[in-house]
Amino acid sequence: MKNTYKLLSIIAMIAIIALSMTACGDPGDDGVPKSIKITGITGETGTITAGISDGGTNKNALKAFSQVPFNANPTIPLLSNASGKTGEAFTGTGQFYVVIIFEPGNSYVYSQGTTVPVKYNITEATSTIPFGQFIKVEN
């Protein structure tokens, strides 16, 4: 009888844990497609690639990105670069390095106006970041 009670208790705990994990969903993905709006771009021309990265600042390191023709205040939709999801709308949330690549031209990374790269917290459908908060990356 004691063993049956222990077994039922373990089964109940497993069920509670499984149900609570299912109800919470993935905290790193809210299902909303993300975009980055860069405002006030000056001194650059060409195609703009913008994306997010966990580390590197080159195009191959980007977790999600896309390209748009140049304009001073572009809104760039983030498309997944993950295996099996390439080209799908990126719906993740979290802190990432934000990278801008002008082709041909220079690359920049978000720095919050400082001299070192800083991760940006992506939570909204569109994250608006002034161009003045990026620093040039040496290629």
Image (cartoon, rainbow, N blue to C red):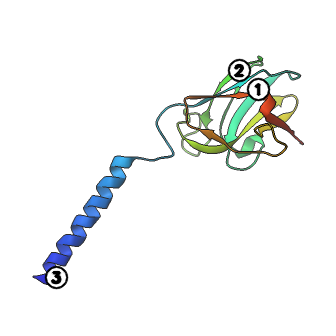
Q: Mark 1 and mark 2: span between their CA atoms?
A: 9 Å
Name the amino acid, label 2: Pro
Viewer-nearest of labels 1 and 2?
2
* Residue on which disc 1 sits: 48
| First of labels 2, 3 by sequence position | 3
* Image quarter of residue 125: top right
Q: Quadrant of the N terminus?
A: bottom left
* Image quarter of residue 100: top right
Name the amino acid, label 1: Ile
Point out the residue furthest to the bottom here.
2
Q: Give the vertical position of 54 relative to 18 (above or below).
A: above
How many numbered discs? 3
* Residue on which disc 2 sits: 74
x and y percent of residue 139 in the render? 89, 42
Q: Secondary structure at mark 3?
A: helix
x and y percent of residue 58 in the render? 78, 43
